[in-house]
Amino acid sequence: MEPFAPSPAARHEPVAVVGTACRLPGGITGLAGLWAALAEERDLIAAAPPAGRADPGRFVDPDPKRRGKAYTMAGGYLGDVSGFDPEYFGISPREAAHMDPQQRMLLEMTAEALDDAAVDAAGLAGSDTAVFAGISDMSYGGLQMARPEEITAYAMSGSALSIAANRLSYVFDLRGPSIAVDTACSSSLVAVHQACETLRSGRSRVALAGGANLLLSPYHFIGFSRARMLSPRGRCATFSANADGYVRAEGGGMVVLKRLSDALADGDRVHAVIEASGANCDGSTSGLTVPSTEMQRRLLHEVYEEAGAAPDRLLYFEAHGTGTPVGDPLECRAVGEALGLRRTSGPLPIGSVKTNLGHAEPASGMAGLFKGILVLRHGRIPASLHGEPRNPQIDFDALNLCPVGSMRPVAAGVDGGVVGVNSFGFGGANAHVVLGAAPRRRSAPPVPEGPLPLVVSARTRKALSEAARAVAERLERGGDAEFYDVCWTASRRRTRHPHRTAVLASGPAEAAAQLTALAADEVALAAASVHTERPAAGGAVFVFCGNGTQWAGMGAALMAQEPVFRAAVEEADRHLEPLLGWSVAALLAEGARGESPEGAEGAAPGAGCADPMTGTAFAQPALFAFQMGLVALLAECGAVPAAVLGHSVGEVAAAYACGALDLPDAARVIAERSRAQAATAGTGRMAAVGLSEQEAAEAVAPYDGRLEIAAVNSARDVTVSGEPEALRVLGRELAEREVPFRELPVDHGFHSAAMDPVEEPLRAGLAGLVSREPRLPMYSTVTGGPVTAGQLDAAYWWHNARRPVRFADAVGRAAGAGAAAMVEIAPHPALAGALHRIASDAPARSPWSPPRPGTGATARPYAAPPCDCWPRGTRAAPTAGSRSPARSRACRRTRGSASRTGTARRSTGSAPAATASWCTRCWASAPRSWSRRGTPPSSAPARRGWPTTVSRGPW
């Protein structure tokens, strides 16, 4: 992103808060949790640190005169602060052990804030995004330095405050200003102000701002106790006569900021708008830590003048409000004189979130900022606790101020109401932010015309399970109205991690049920997920299967329940029936009745058999029509191929899908091919063999042409075809050598000398056939290369029936052209194993990588290959939606433990983090007919009537 020179208007442009993340006492990890705590008036202060921290018995004595002791260690504490997921951020466990947990927390919150903003972190890499991090405490470094023998090079960067911001820029490759801000208790709000200034100057287009604070050392409690700053009662009694000091707290927050015009242009969901911000310093006062009413008052005048906000527009004032006998009266005086006395609409409501959470020192401004956002969002002001009786040193009536002692609505009828957030440092650094409400969003999301795809992604399979469960929980709390936005947001905006799974659902309850089922079943999740390490580049390649994947009853449910599928099959049937003498649509619709189609008597050997699908005359046309139906069904939902290839007879469907053959010509090819090959029934057999092509050639050489290589499916998979007795002998020989050998349930010697009798009838039947230039690439499994105009003539289709299937070569060419996914178009997956092995043998530069193979096809339609095969404006998502806040935890944290030096010991078995992401870019293996009817049991065989329509390969 190139910086630009801002216009005068841009220098005063509002800044949008588009993403948030937090860690606050009470297990609060989001704004919803914070609002619940505030609304319920929870006091989240604990009397002592959590177990495993400093021992209060050693460091606490209630006598304030006792030297070397703190009279309190009460605080607002987080839970586990040693847990971290280093892999997620590309950090080694050894380095992570020497990183200040505040740095770790900032990394986690940044990932979560970007996810909340629906900003793809990879899209920010290399940009001028700015980072400002408020941080003050260096306890972790001090604890490490106390044991010199354990100091490493990592300890230096892990302890430096500057690295708190610089590490964020490094990990996410952000190249704008990167500054750690330490102005004590105002650090994080100063960081927000500096971020706003950077955005308004045009130096950066996106900025990250926040802060973190952890109470890792007991010595700060001792120091603040000696200064008599801490509350002996362990309560921030802001504005109360009982105010006797503040309570320390842990926590942090991060926001993603953009200029409002940029946020609206990007379609961002805006939490709130920063109308103006400012910072100054007290200068010389009666004491270094004594606030200056004059400078606080001046700052408020300047900031509200810049915001153009008259005092009567102020709905609520979130004070610094620590509960100290000196600070509270001076702050109220400044607020009253600058704002309260200038109001005509009644006293100014004032309060402090510190009464609930404690004072998070350098991170405290983030809690106040988040409370201000929530007041604007909900239109209500939560109570500040412990405020009675009121402080007699503060004349609230004379200052026209009103402490909020119970939940109350904001003033009605205020046009453009704002909320003020105050923050001071004990060295005199002051900051203030004026928040305005988010712009109105459109009244209702677009109405989809069908189910929507939901893809959840994660860094590992285990994290994927957790992410699926988290998204399900979020959907259960949400409503139908936001479901479209949730789908659209994640499909277009969120970071996509390597492990992905997908469901297709008409609403949040259905999606939640499917995700919950996947999260609870490792086998189903493994079968329904895909793994890719590289970004999608070349789209999806549709791989059309060949003989052997058909089964009695395939397509019956789809014919009955999917109009688009049925229409495509019936269209193919209009061209096939005159050539075949029987209806392929009727065959598919009738399912497994065990009867040949009406009018098919005498059509070919195999007619009249108990299972028509065992006869080539019926199986090949049925397979072709079935594949046409699947392609139409996927296209209706927006899943379209970037290239195609076919295995043996699957090339006919591939040729039609890419436009090389029109439907009449494709029907002609399939009719002539199936009729000619049907006559060879009983003349040969086939077997799958676990040998390379060269090894297989050597194995069949002694049989003098009685056996041939029929297909090369991967570097370790071939199919051998030929005379039945010779094939059985070969099987015994290979068994002695412990070579995998499996005879296939096929009574034809396809791609062998057994096919020689069909050459003349096939060439004659297809005489004059002329193919077109494919409109998208088709990779030939006859030649292994791309198909060109005119190539698919009668001679080609004879070679297609006789020559070995060069499947591995064709897949390799497609992968080399940048294929991001292989999607098997089949009634039952047959090629997934070969695709997996090809992917396993691929060079590192290839833009795809294999998943763990699943246990069956029944769950595979959920899988989400990593490619762009859902174009914008499809039936499923006709128009852009609004960004939705639905997300899962960005990081899967592993619990650790702290040693005496404070280094974190990472437990074994951790897995990298997960985020929830919707990937319309490729859910190609999730046809509507599958997910709408739910997940079949993972043990259910694919032949039970479940519409196991598509298997995705290992990309």
Image (tube, rainbow, N blue to C red):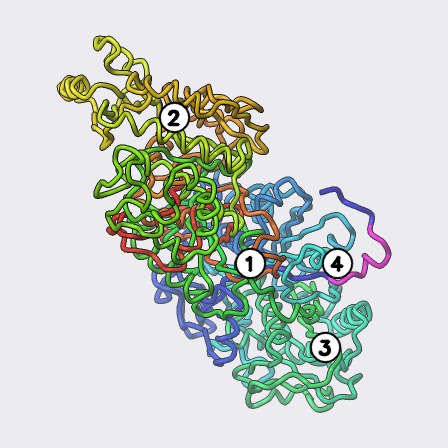
Which residue is the site of mark 4?
261
Q: Position of residue 486 (x, y in %)?
A: 53, 61
Give me the residue at 46% from left, 78% from top. 42
Residue 10 part of the magenta segment? yes
Q: Amino acid at mark 3?
A: Gly
For this rendering, which residue is in front, 852 or 174? Answer: 852
Give me the residue at 73% from left, 82% from top. 414
- Of circles 2 and 3, which is in front? 2
Which residue is the site of mark 1?
116
Q: Quadrant of the C terminus?
A: top left
Q: Position of residue 272 (x, y in %)?
A: 66, 67
**Segment tinted magenta in the rendering:** 6-14
Give me the residue at 44% from left, 44% from top. 573
Secondary structure under badge 2?
Answer: loop
Which residue is the site of mark 3?
417
Which residue is the site of mark 2?
841
For this rendering, which residue is in front, 640 or 900? Answer: 640
Q: Is residue 310 left or right of residue 212?
A: right
Q: Amino acid at mark 1?
A: Asp
Q: Amino acid at mark 4?
A: Ser
Residue 238 part of the magenta segment? no
Secondary structure under badge 3?
Answer: loop
Q: Is residue 86 above or below residue 790?
A: below
Going from N to C along the chain, the mark reached first, 1 or 3, is 1
Q: Amino acid at mark 2?
A: Asp
Within 10 angstroms of label 4, few (less than 14), some, or many (20 or more) residues?
some
Give the CA distance from mark 1 to mark 3: 25 Å
